Image (spheres, helix red, strand yellow):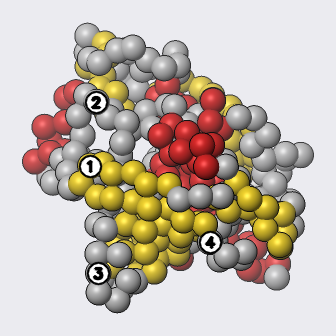
């Protein structure tokens, strides 16, 4: 399959979930084979940080990429939108250390990509790794795994004591519409955890405008976009984190009560397998 880049420039400005700082992003077409990568245009040497597994340096409530002292946080929603819309190569210029949260989903990004369109490029993607044996990462009762499969699929299950979320399951195939089925699902949090997270320096930019908040009485800021919006958002996160592999292996990715940390551990294990087969 031929590689693609965007056919025009995309710009967005917004507040970062954890930093609470406003940043501006420009997404530009990029050369065949260059991949998806970030450029910190606010720094004098314009450091480039590739959207690759090797660049991950932190996974606390988001995925952070880094190179030396330079980092970019909460990359997963934008990267999920790019890979979900078929963008192989893109230059992402950002004037700060965190990608804007926007409405808490990937919808603004997928809408923007659809508006400018894609252009085919002169080279093809390498053949995807075909998984022959299961790969598992687990921590207590949470896990993330990749299973041999005939096509690439992402399945997720979550289980919360909060009644308004409870137990949810969703499965999505890479052949289905990411923009319609996954991208609109917003990030979410629990009302009783918000004060503690803010005291520890997290979610400074979170609000009822960019995150679903669930309390003991139910959803604080309805309506939902999907009956199972929280678990669809977990698939969004998983797609974004695994996009750091460059291309998805042919496998069924399955997760239960997982985290960015488990997603990235799974990606690293898959990368080790890919390198071993080269």
Residue 222 vs 194, above or below: the answer is above
- Per the image, label 2 sits on a secondary structure element best described as loop
Residue 53 visible in the picture: no
Q: Which of marks 4 and 2 is nearer the N terminus?
A: 4
In this rendering, would 115 be left or right of 202? right
Task: Measuring from the top left, give residue 149's x and y in whole percent.
Answer: 85, 47
Q: Residue at position x 20%, y 51% from top?
A: 20
Q: Distance between the residues labelled 1 and 2?
A: 11 Å
Can you say which quadrant of the picture contains the C terminus? bottom right
Q: Disc 4 designates what residue?
A: 30
52 or 112, nearer to the observer: 112
In this rendering, would 95 be left or right of 154? left
Most distant residue in the left direction: 199
- How many numbered marks does the figure carry? 4
Q: Residue 209 carries which label?
A: 2
Q: Disc 1 designates what residue?
A: 15
Q: Earlier in the sequence, mark 2 or mark 3?
A: 3
Q: Disc 3 designates what residue?
A: 43
Task: Measuring from the top left, give residue 196's x and y in whole percent.
Answer: 14, 42
208 or 102, nearer to the observer: 102
Q: Which of marks 3 and 4 is nearer the N terminus?
A: 4
Q: Residue 159 carries which label?
A: none
- Per the image, label 4 sits on a secondary structure element best described as loop
Most distant residue in the bottom direction: 45
């Amino acid at each position: 399959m031929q590689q693609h880049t965007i056919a025009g420039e995309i710009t967005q400005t917004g507040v970062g979930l954890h930093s609470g700082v406003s940043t501006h992003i420009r997404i530009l077409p990029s050369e065949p084979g260059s991949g998806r990568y970030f450029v910190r245009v606010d720094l004098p040497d314009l450091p480039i940080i590739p959207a690759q597994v090797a660049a991950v340096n932190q996974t606390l409530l988001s995925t952070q990429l880094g190179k030396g002292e330079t980092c970019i946080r909460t990359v997963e929603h934008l990267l999920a939108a790019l890979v979900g819309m078929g963008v192989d190569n893109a230059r992402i210029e950002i004037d700060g250390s965190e990608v804007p949260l926007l409405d808490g989903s990937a919808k603004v990004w997928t809408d923007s990509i659809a508006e400018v369109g894609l252009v085919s490029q002169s080279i093809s993607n390498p053949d995807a790794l075909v998984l022959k044996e299961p790969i598992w990462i687990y921590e207590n009762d949470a896990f993330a795994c990749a299973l041999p499969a005939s096509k690439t699929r992402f399945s997720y299950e979550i289980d919360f004591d909060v009644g308004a979320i409870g137990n949810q399951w969703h499965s999505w195939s890479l052949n289905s519409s990411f923009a319609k089925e996954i991208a609109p699902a917003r990030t979410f949090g629990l009302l009783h955890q918000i004060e503690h997270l803010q005291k520890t320096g997290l979610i400074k930019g979170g609000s009822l405008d960019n995150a679903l908040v669930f309390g003991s009485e139910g959803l604080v800021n309805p309506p939902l976009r999907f009956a199972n919006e929280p678990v669809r958002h977990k698939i969004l996160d998983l797609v974004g984190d695994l996009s750091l592999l460059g291309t998805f292996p042919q496998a069924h990715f399955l997760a239960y009560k997982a985290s960015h940390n488990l997603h990235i551990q799974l990606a690293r294990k898959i990368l080790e397998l890919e390198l071993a087969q080269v």
